[in-house]
Image (cartoon, grey):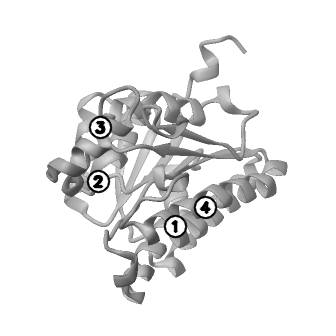
Amino acid sequence: MNELSLFRIKGKTALVTGAGRGLGRGYAIALGRAGCKCICVGRSLDDLIETKQIIEQEQGDAEAVVLDVTQFNRLKAAVDRIEECFGAIDVLVNNAGTEIAEPFLEVTEDHYDAIMDVNLKAVFFLTQAAAGKMKTRKQGKIINIGSLGSVIGLPGSSVYCSSKGAITQLTKTAALELAPYGIQVNAIFPGYFLTEMTQPFFNDPEHKAWIENKIPLGRIGTADDLVGTLLFLAAPASDYITGQSLSVDGGWTAG
């Protein structure tokens, strides 16, 4: 295998959750540009169609699939149907996430469940469903999206950080169990990126200054800053890497 083919994923099929907006849309577009058929999954058909159209405008191949990843009893059937309609899933990007920022002493059980269901339970069971298919083919790439909160604590985000910290261990344990089937499981931990979900943090001048002062590279990340890591983990170049988490945070967690 030559150096260029190590990074070639053209013709692969990738499923990205939360692909209708934010970083998920960025992941889907990047995979589409690299030649993947991108299955864009989310709850809003309008948002998904917009992502699909962006990919297709660049001569890429995409499909929009409405799916609520917290409907856990539907995930296996949904994966079966997606593979039946669009072909085998080679790459799964578990991106869908949510946050309800509030003080620890004010967290309710409903808010706890809402965050954990999307950020952890859905990742677990969608990975299980996709890996069951990948197992029969002896290959597959699963990329979980963690966070700064996977590594450090963030005040006001106790449940979010708990869910994202668990992604670290889920990535490791799934990697160990799925390795015999040729499946690699890794994670990306983005730092602070400007998205619809993080916009409130940037609207607060004091909080925004705090974020910027924490980043050694001196700037907020953009979706383009995640593309290289995403494509590396989706490509043959990472075939001997599994159970690992790569922080893309401008150096924040290096200190």
Labels 1 and 2: the sequence-earlier one: 2
Q: How dense is the environment of label 1, judged by Cα within 10 Å: few (below 14), some, or many (20 and up)?
A: many
Which residue has dot 3 on it? 212
- The amino acid at mark 3 is Glu
Q: Tell me the distance, in whole angstroms, between the alpha carbons under discs 1 and 2.
A: 22 Å
Judge whether 107 appears above or below 127 on screen: below
Give me the residue at 61% from left, 59% from top.
Answer: 130
Give me the residue at 68% from left, 11% from top.
Answer: 2
- Residue 163 — which label? 1
Which residue has dot 4 on it? 127
Q: Which quadrant would the N terminus be assigned to in this image?
A: top right
Closer to the camera: disc 3 or disc 4? 3
Closer to the camera: disc 1 or disc 2? 1
- The amino acid at mark 2 is Gly
- Residue 147 — which label? none
- The amino acid at mark 1 is Ser
- Front-most of residues 190 and 227: 190
Labels 3 and 1: the sequence-earlier one: 1
Labels 4 and 2: the sequence-earlier one: 2
Closer to the camera: disc 1 or disc 4? 1
How far from the left and from the top, in percent, is residue 45? 24, 62
Labels 1 and 4: the sequence-earlier one: 4
Mark 3, secondary structure of its residue? helix
Q: Tell me the distance, in whole angstroms, between the alpha carbons under discs 4 and 2.
A: 20 Å
Mark 1, secondary structure of its residue? helix
- Residue 20 — which label? 2
Mark 2, secondary structure of its residue? loop
Give me the residue at 35% from left, 30% from top.
Answer: 224
Q: How dense is the environment of label 3, judged by Cα within 10 Å: few (below 14), some, or many (20 and up)?
A: some
Number of numbered labels in the structure image: 4
